[in-house]
Amino acid sequence: MNRSDKKQKFFVELIKPSHYDDDGYVIQWLKAWIPSNTLSSIYGISMDLIERRALGDDVDVVLNAYDETNTIIPIKDIIRRQTSEGAKGVVCLVGVQSNQFPRAMDMARQFRAKGLQVAIGGFHPSGCLSMLPELPPDLQEAVDIGITLYAGESEGRLQDFYLDALNGDMKSIYNYMSDLPGIDDEPTPFLPEKMVRKYGASIACFDAGRGCPFQCSFCTIINVQGRKSRFREADDVERLVRANMKQGIYRYFITDDNFARNKNWEAIFDRLGDLKEELGLPFSITIQVDTLCHKIKNFIPKAKRAGVSRVFIGMENINPDNLMHAKKRQNRITEYRTMLQMWRNQQIITFAGYILGFPADTPEKIANDIEIIKRELPVDILEFFCLTPLPGSEDHQNLYKQGIPMDPDMNIYDLEHVCTGHAMMSKDEWQGIYNKAWELYYSDDHVATMMKRMVVSGNKPERIWMHTLQFAGCIRFEKVHPLQGGYFRRKVRTQRRSGLPIESPFVFYPKRIWDVITTYGPFAAYTLKLFLLAKKIKRDPATQSYMDLALTPVDEHGEDEHLEMFELSESAKAAVAKAHRETEARESRAQQVTAAE
C-alpha cells in the first residue's frame, strides 16, 4: 500500500436544501435563479482547510456540495460513501431557512437512520437560538434524534467542528450567536464552475459585508448577523472575483442585506470598476440597498462604473404608518421618486420589495396602493411578500411571548403564505389579495408602460420582457414565488414530504406530463405575446417622446408635488410636512453661509 492508501477518508457533504410546494414535492429546477451565499461561504472555508491540511496530514478530505434547488440530492450515494469500510464523514445541511427546515429534517432522518453524523445550520436554528428562551419543538426533535444544531457563522470555527466530526465527538449544539467573527482577510465564498453553471445566467454570489444597523421588526438579519456590520476589504473582493474569472464567471450577486451601509462600498466599487476597465470584461452585478442610498455622494454613479445592472431596494410600503409599525424609520416616501429616478438615469433596473399584511392593510387599500405605485413611482420590478413572523425576527419573538397563534408548519414561512391572523383581513382575504397583487401590477397595460419607460430612459424594453417572465410568469404559471424560481421545474416522484403518499408511477407520470403541457404551453404563449409587445414598443416612434407622472423629473422641492401617495393618510401628510421643513432649513443654512461669505 502506498502512503495515500493509508490516509483516513473523511467525507464532507454540504447540502443546501430546498423546500416543498403545496403538493409536498421538492421545489427544484433545471437551473435555479438565486445562488446560496452560505453554501459558497462554507465551501470556500472548507477548501482553505483542505489546502492547508488543517485536519491533519493523514486525513484525506473529500468535499461534495449540492444545492437542492438545481440538483437531485444523491442520498443513497452519500450513505454508501459514509458507511463504506474505514470511512468517516459528516452531512451538513447548510443555510437552512425556516421554510426549508421540514425538508432538511426529512433528509436528516434518512441519514441518521443509517448512522451518519448530521448537522443543521442556517437562519432557522440561528434565529431561534438567538431570539427564543427555549428550543421550539422542531429543533428539539432534531436534537432528540441525534442531529447537531449549528448556530452562527463558520469563519474561525469550521476547523474545530470538522475535527469533532472526524473524532466522532460532535456536540448537540454549537452556539456562536454571541460571538460573531470578523470576515476581512478570511477565505472568500466560492463554488466550482460546474455548480455555478447550474444557476440561471451562471451567477456567482458573495457577501462583502454582514449585519445591518437598522431595526426592521420583520427582519432576521439583524438578530442572526448582528446590527454591528462587518466587512470584507477590496483586496478580498478582487481575489474572489479573479478566482471566478478563471472559471469564466462574470456575473455576481453581492448578498449584503444593505450594501449602501458597507463602509468599504467605495473601495469595492472602485476596484471592480478598475478591473472591468483593465480587463475589458462585461461584469453584471446585482446589489441590495436601502431607500436613502442616493443620498450617499457618488454611490449610484460608482455602482454603474463597477458593473451594477440590477438593484434590489427595500421599499416595503408607501404608507408611513406601516413603515413605522415595522420600525422602517429610514424609509421616507418623499424620497422614493428621486431615488428611483437616479437609478433609472444610470440605466440600472430597479427591483423593490413590497410587504402586504401590515395592521392597517385591507384588500381595498392594498389594491389602491398598487395603482398609485404604477402611476407615481418609476420602479421597474415589484416583488410582493406576505408579512411573515420569521423565527429570528422581533415580530416572531413578540408573537411567541404573547402566545398569539402562528401556523406550526414551517414549510409555509416562505413569505408567500399567510402564517398568522390579521385584525382587518381573514386568512383567505389576505392570501387572496397577495395573489391578486401580482395580477394588478403586471397587467398588460402596465407592462407596456414599463417597457416605454425603459426606452425613454435609454434602456432596452427586452429587459422588462425578461424580468416580467421571471416574476409575473413564475407566479402565474409555476405557482411559486420568483425568488424560489428557475428554468424548467423538476418533480421527482419519490421526493415527497414525509407523511404524504408516494404516488404510483401510473398516476404520477401521466399527471406530470399534463402539468408540463398545461404549464409551459400557456407560458410559451405569454412569452411570445410579451416579446412581440416589446418589439412593437421599440419600433414605435411615439415611444421616444413618452412621458408620464412617474418619469416627470423631481425638483429640489419634491415634497411640494401633488401626488396621491402624499395624501393617503395623515401620516403621509406629516411626512411631507417634515420634508418641507427640512428643505426650508437647508435653504436657510445655505443662505446664511452665502451671506457670511
Image (cartoon, grey):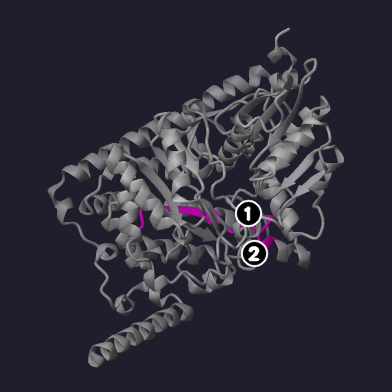
Q: Position of residue 143 (x, y in %)?
A: 83, 42
In front of the other: 269 or 484: 269
Q: Residue furthest left?
A: 541
Residue at 36% across / 42% down in the picture? 284
Say which element carries label 2. Answer: loop
In front of the other: 580 or 37: 37
Residue at 29% across / 78% down in the picture? 557
Range shown magenta: 377-396
Asked whether 528 falls inside the magenta stretch, the response is: no
Q: Which residue is mark 1?
A: 418
Residue at 48% across / 33% down in the picture? 199
The Cα atoms of the two marked residues, 2 and 1, are separated by 9 Å
In front of the other: 473 or 188: 188
Q: Which residue is mark 2?
A: 422
The mark tally for this picture is 2
In front of the other: 462 or 515: 462
Q: Residue furthest top?
A: 1
Above or below — where is 240 with respect to 88?
A: below
- Snapshot quadrant of residue 21: top right
Can residue 303 be seen at all in this image of the molecule?
A: yes
Image quadrant holding the N terminus, namely top right
Q: Position of residue 91 (x, y in %)?
A: 72, 31
Q: Are marks 2 and 1 in contact (CB under 8 Å)?
A: yes
